[in-house]
Structure formats: C-alpha cells, structure tokens
Image (tube, grey):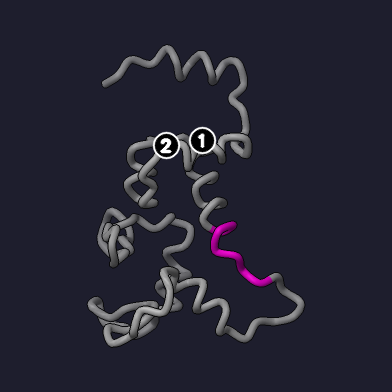
Amino acid sequence: MDADGTLVTVRGDNARQVPLLGRWEDDLLHAIGTLEPEDRVFGSRSRARKGRNLVNTFVANSVLSPQRPRPQTNRMRATSLVTHLAARTDIRVLMTASGVGKFENLARLLQYVPALDTAEYRRMLRKEAG
C-alpha cells in the first residue's frame, strides 16, 4: 500500500500486480490485520497446487451461512470486469490487470455494460488521443 493505493500481487503462470478498487481497501486492511507485507492473504508457500483456482477451493471448503448465496468465482470475475468496462477503464489496462489474453473474452460481457447516451457517445468519439 502506498499513496497511490493498494496493489494485490497475483502469483502463478500469469503473475501481475493489480490495483485494488479504492472502495475495498479498508475492508482488505481490516481482514489482513497483523499480516506482514510479505505474507500471503490466501494460501501458503508450502501449499501443494490442488487445482487452478485457489478461490474456488477456498469457497468450496468454507462453511457459509445457508441464508447467503454461495459465491461463484466466475460471476465475481464477470462482475468485476463489467464494473471496469462500465467505468470506461482502458481495455489494455483491464486485460493486463485481469490476465485476459483475448479481447473476445471481454466482448461477451459488453451486453451487460450500460449504453452511453448520445451526448456521452459523441463526446467520447470527439476526444483526441493525447
């Protein structure tokens, strides 16, 4: 964490650092409590790889309240991507941060992004690259 926000380090085949949405920073800081900067939030250094998705494994092994829906990581990821697409996050930045290698993987989510009104559509297309 620094003056520009919080970075989450994603390790593995597609290692990268991803800025955390500002609205989640306080929750993350509370959740990690007394961890040291080099500590992992999920998993451990000695954890044997049991599948590709650590979060799926975590959710599957968690005791959750029957009154709450069970988190589905594919939906969580799609929601995050749609949130950024709706906020007009630069596509290259979004693909890098999310580890998406093909635009087609984002294009299928565009149906869930609110359409621009006419004035915003025109304003965006009149901008000059800078």
Check if mark 1's residue and mark 2's residue have beta carbons within 8 Å. yes
Query: Which residue is most to the left?
Result: 38
Q: Which amino acid does label 2 sit on?
A: Phe
Q: Which amino acid does label 1 sit on?
A: Ala
Q: Position of residue 115 (x, y in %)?
A: 61, 28
Q: Could you tell me how far apart the alpha carbons at marks 1 and 2 are, in whole angstroms?
A: 6 Å
Quadrant assignment, res 118: top right
Please name whichever residue, 87 or 30, is drawn nearer the observer in this view of the structure.
87
Q: Position of residue 17 (x, y in %)?
A: 28, 58
- How many marks are shown on the rendered structure? 2
Q: Assign the N terminus to one quadrant of the image.
A: bottom left
Q: Position of residue 114 (x, y in %)?
A: 62, 33
Residue 103 tag number: 2
For residue 54, above or below residue 9: below
Residue 107 tag number: 1
User: What's the residue at 56%, 51% (across, down)?
Assistant: 79
Please name whichever residue, 36 or 103, is drawn nearer the observer in this view of the structure.
103
| Residue 31 left/right relative to 35 | right
User: What's the residue at 48%, 58% (across, down)?
Assistant: 23
Please name whichever residue, 26 or 92, is drawn nearer the observer in this view of the structure.
92
Q: Position of residue 117 (x, y in %)?
A: 62, 21
User: What's the residue at 41%, 79% (across, down)?
Assistant: 50
> Can residue 63 be found in the magenta stretch?
no
